[in-house]
Amino acid sequence: MVEKSEKYLPRVASHDEKHYHGAPDGSSIVEGSEDVTEYELATLRHVADRLPYTSWLVVICEFAERWSYYGTTNIYNNYIQFKLPPGSRTGAVPKALRDGNVVAGALGQGQQKSFALRTFNSFWVYCTPFIGGILADTLWGRYKTIMIFSIVCLVGHVILTASAAPSSLEHGGPALGLLALSIVVMGLGAGSIKANVSPMIAEQYTGKLRKETLPSGEVVIKSPAVTIQSMYLWFYAAVNFGSCGAISASFLARDHGYWTAFLVPTCIFAIVPFVLLLGKKNYVVTPPRGSILLETIRCINVALAPRWSWNPVTTYRQCKSNDFWDIAKPSYYAQGQVPAKITWDDEFVGEVDRTISACKVFLFFPIFWLCYSQIDGNLGTIAAGMTLNGTPNDLIQ
């Protein structure tokens, strides 16, 4: 009988294996590890190390921030577009009317203003990460930036909650003004936090590549790469769990009014500064090292300055020339005559060139998000005209 030969797929090299090479017999120690040989790195199972508790604190902060964000923005459409339900001072639907097609509402500004404010909110929260990132890289560092803007964001939540107070809704005008102010303040805080919280969680792990024997007797590799991967799995799990705030907000607004619906996310977000303070002495804090974004902008400015013209066609043609980036390279100048504002090397200029070329793929994003926001808002509006049978119309968003 002919035995069937078994075929095995070749083992895919890990991130650690790709970056370390030593003696052919695998006996050399991997650089930066705790006595892990090349052979052990290639043959032993790689597992995640224990996550430091400061990483869990960052995960909690992200959960609270996302819950508060989705728990407020998801009900903006009804809050802005529809009027107060009959007999309501808070925007809640009276219990006797919940089985009908009456939906929660407050400001009664119509769909056009609702779409405009919600679109501005989306635009704003995607712009403010630049502010938070630059401040963290050049002035405060990530921890201090997150702490400061968590207070800013909390103030925005308080303003939003105040806009939905019954006394404010009765007059209408102050409520709309407070809402617009809260969108600006909250967007500044949320965006600046978002730019720093994801890199901060990775900084909390400082372990090295090492071996460990499990209770089963198996020897495994405690891998920093796998550990960081595990961190981000928990981090984005927190983001996804936080999005459940949108579900609770829809029911809170319908059953208890907008004052309560906005107060709950505010209280949840209020834990963020306290959690940050709890681990203050234990966080791994990276000092400011300069902003790569500002350096990139300066590099582009140096290259663009001599090409600029009031004629857009001329500017475009000059920017497409093959030597566009040459003037931004230190090698373009004679030795000792490099302008003081050029603080980078030729390789950096090449990286900026490749980055800008790659970013062309994102040019369609503004169009996509405008369409997406329009669809998102219309879903709730269309649902408001359907038979709801006690389901909040903005639950579909």
Image (cartoon, helix red, strand yellow):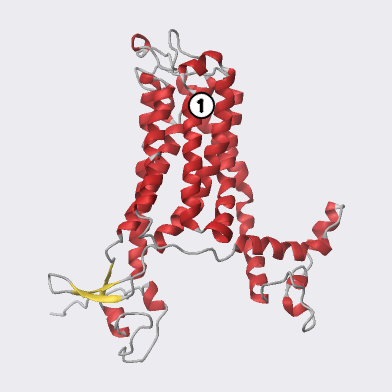
User: Could you tell me which residue is drawn at 44 percent across and 55 percent down?
Assistant: 198
Picture coordinates of residue 158, whole percent (x, y)? 47, 31
Secondary structure, mark 1, is helix
Residue in front for this viewpoint, 86 or 313? 86
Picture coordinates of residue 202, whole percent (x, y)? 40, 61
Does 34 appear above or below 175? below
Q: Is residue 357 visible?
A: no
Q: Quadrant of residue 342?
A: bottom right
Picture coordinates of residue 20, whole percent (x, y)? 40, 81
Number of other residues with Cα within 10 Å of mark 1, as a class: few under 14, some 14 to 19, many 20 or more: many
Q: Quadrant of residue 320?
A: bottom right
- Is 343 placed left or right of 307 in the picture? left
- Residue wearing tag 1: 77
Q: Is residue 60 visible?
A: yes
Residue in front for this viewpoint, 112 or 276? 276
User: Could you tell me which residue is drawn at 16 percent across and 80 percent down?
Assistant: 2
- Is 60 placed left or right of 187 in the picture? left
Does 55 appear above or below 117? below
